[in-house]
Amino acid sequence: MKYFILLVVIASLGCIIYGFNLDESQEALSHKYIGSGTLGLFLIAMPLFLYKESKSRDFKDYMLTDENVRKMQGKEPRKPEDS
């Protein structure tokens, strides 16, 4: 998965660079290469990278609950009161 993402990133950057290096007479083709490279980066590589990196994470650790806010502030978590 890591190497596939790297391949997509390199191919997308290659398309963008190639699009910028085309002559002015091929302006429409240049825009197609630049656009497809940008789409490759943002619609293929970025979501795959985010999925790969967040697959083993627990999202409850990143949510702003009262308990997590108190941990960030260095305060003791509230203990439930017995009624």
Image (cartoon, rainbow, N blue to C red):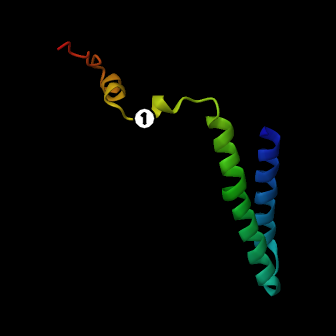
Q: Quadrant of residue 58?
A: top right
Residue 26 x %, y %? 82, 83
Which amino acid, by three-letter code, is at mark 1? Met
Residue sitting at x 81%, y 67%: 18
Residue sitting at x 71%, y 70%: 35
Residue under label 1: 63
Horizontal side of residue 29 vs 52, given as left or right: right
Work out which quarter of the rendered image holds the C terminus and state it. top left
Horizontal side of residue 66 vs 15, given as left or right: left
In the image, 37 versus 21, the foreground residue is 37
Q: Quadrant of residue 28?
A: bottom right
Work out which quarter of the rendered image holds the N terminus and state it. top right
Return the residue found at the far front. 83
Return the residue found at the far bottom. 25
Residue sitting at x 28%, y 16%: 76
Residue 34 x %, y %? 73, 69
Return the residue found at the far left. 83
* Element marked by disc 1: loop
Residue sitting at x 47%, y 28%: 61
Horizontal side of residue 64 vs 30, given as left or right: left
Residue 38 x %, y %? 70, 63
